[in-house]
Image: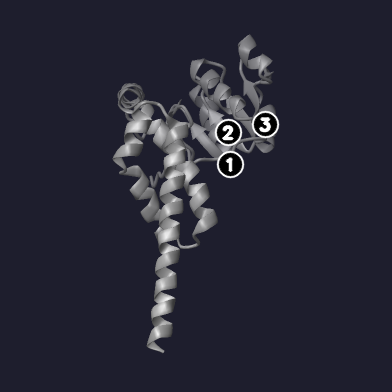
């Protein structure tokens, strides 16, 4: 299949989850945490899920499944009953469908995902090894440093200033690389001094901006002299 990674805004979306086991609970919790409305079909759900707004539907009839699929924007198949899984998948062909049992039979993957501060990282092994996805997660968490996270915050701060000063995207990119590779800024971030690093960035941008203005004025004067 032609899988590619995308981020989907699920806030306010209706999610029907077939199943109430461990995987179904994990899926439900994830959608609830991001503002979705969730109905699970099965025997019981945890108090934690119900407190977050999840609804349990105990009627497992085909008619109920049809109504829930029609209601849903996203369907997750995560039960232990292959017959029900196949049936709900069949009637969900026009929906975003995640199959926890056979990911390749759906059109939506829900990969292992985690945050390091404001950074969200997802790992998808094409359904080959959820275990290795978790192991890779541990490795990534050990590699990403506090300095990396502060650099992201600083780059965001820098981009906002640069967008106000320069329309040219190429010029903004050059400044961002200059900030990323500046040894003084790196030293400040290693020491956790984000505020000081921001002040340093402002000086770099303002000084260079003045230099560019001077260069422009000099070019203009030279043109007049040539005239």
Quadrant placement of the C terminus: bottom left
Percent x, y for residue 83? 52, 26
Specify which label sits upstream in the sequence, 3 or 2: 3
Q: Quadrant of residue 226?
A: bottom left
Confirm or deny contact between disc 2 and disc 1 (CB under 8 A).
Answer: yes
Which residue is under mark 3? 68
Say the numbered circle drawn on residue 95: 1
Q: CA distance from mark 2 to mark 1?
A: 7 Å
Confirm or deny contact between disc 3 and disc 2 (CB under 8 A).
Answer: no
Q: Is any part of residue 44 visible from this angle? A: no
Label 1 element class: loop
Q: Left or right: where does residue 165 sit relative to residue 143?
A: right
Percent x, y for residue 183? 29, 39
Percent x, y for residue 131? 33, 21
Q: Left or right: where does residue 81 sit relative to residue 70?
A: left
Q: Quadrant of residue 220?
A: bottom left
> Which of the two residues, 212 or 104, is positioned nearer the viewer here?
212
Label 1 Cα crowd, 10 Å radius (few <14 / some 14-19 / many 20+): some
Q: CA distance from mark 3 to mark 2?
A: 9 Å
> Which of the two residues, 206 or 176, is positioned nearer the viewer here?
206
Point 68% across, 38% down: residue: 70
Which residue is under mark 2? 75
Specify which label sits upstream in the sequence, 2 or 1: 2
Label 3 element class: helix
């Amino acid at each position: 299949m032609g899988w590619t990674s995308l981020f989907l805004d699920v806030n306010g979306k209706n999610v029907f989850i077939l199943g109430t086991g461990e995987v179904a609970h994990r899926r439900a919790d994830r959608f609830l945490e991001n503002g979705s409305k969730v109905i699970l079909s099965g025997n019981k759900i945890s108090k934690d899920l119900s407190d977050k707004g999840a609804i349990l539907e105990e009627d497992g009839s085909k008619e109920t499944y049809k109504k829930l699929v029609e209601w849903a924007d996203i369907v997750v198949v995560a039960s232990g009953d292959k017959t029900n899984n196949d049936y709900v998948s069949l009637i969900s062909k026009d929906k975003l469908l995640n199959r926890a049992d056979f990911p390749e039979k759906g059109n939506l993957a829900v990969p292992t995902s985690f945050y390091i501060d404001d950074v969200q990282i997802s790992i998808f092994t094409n359904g080959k090894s959820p275990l290795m996805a978790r192991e890779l997660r541990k490795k990534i968490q050990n590699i990403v440093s506090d300095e990396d996270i502060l650099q992201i915050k600083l780059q965001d701060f820098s981009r906002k200033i640069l967008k106000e000063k320069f329309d040219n995207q190429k010029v903004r990119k050059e400044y961002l690389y200059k900030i990323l590779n500046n040894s003084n800024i790196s030293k400040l971030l290693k020491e956790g001094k984000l505020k000081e690093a921001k002040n340093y960035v402002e000086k770099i941008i303002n000084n260079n901006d003045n230099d560019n203005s001077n260069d422009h004025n000099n070019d203009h004067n030279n043109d007049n002299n040539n005239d």
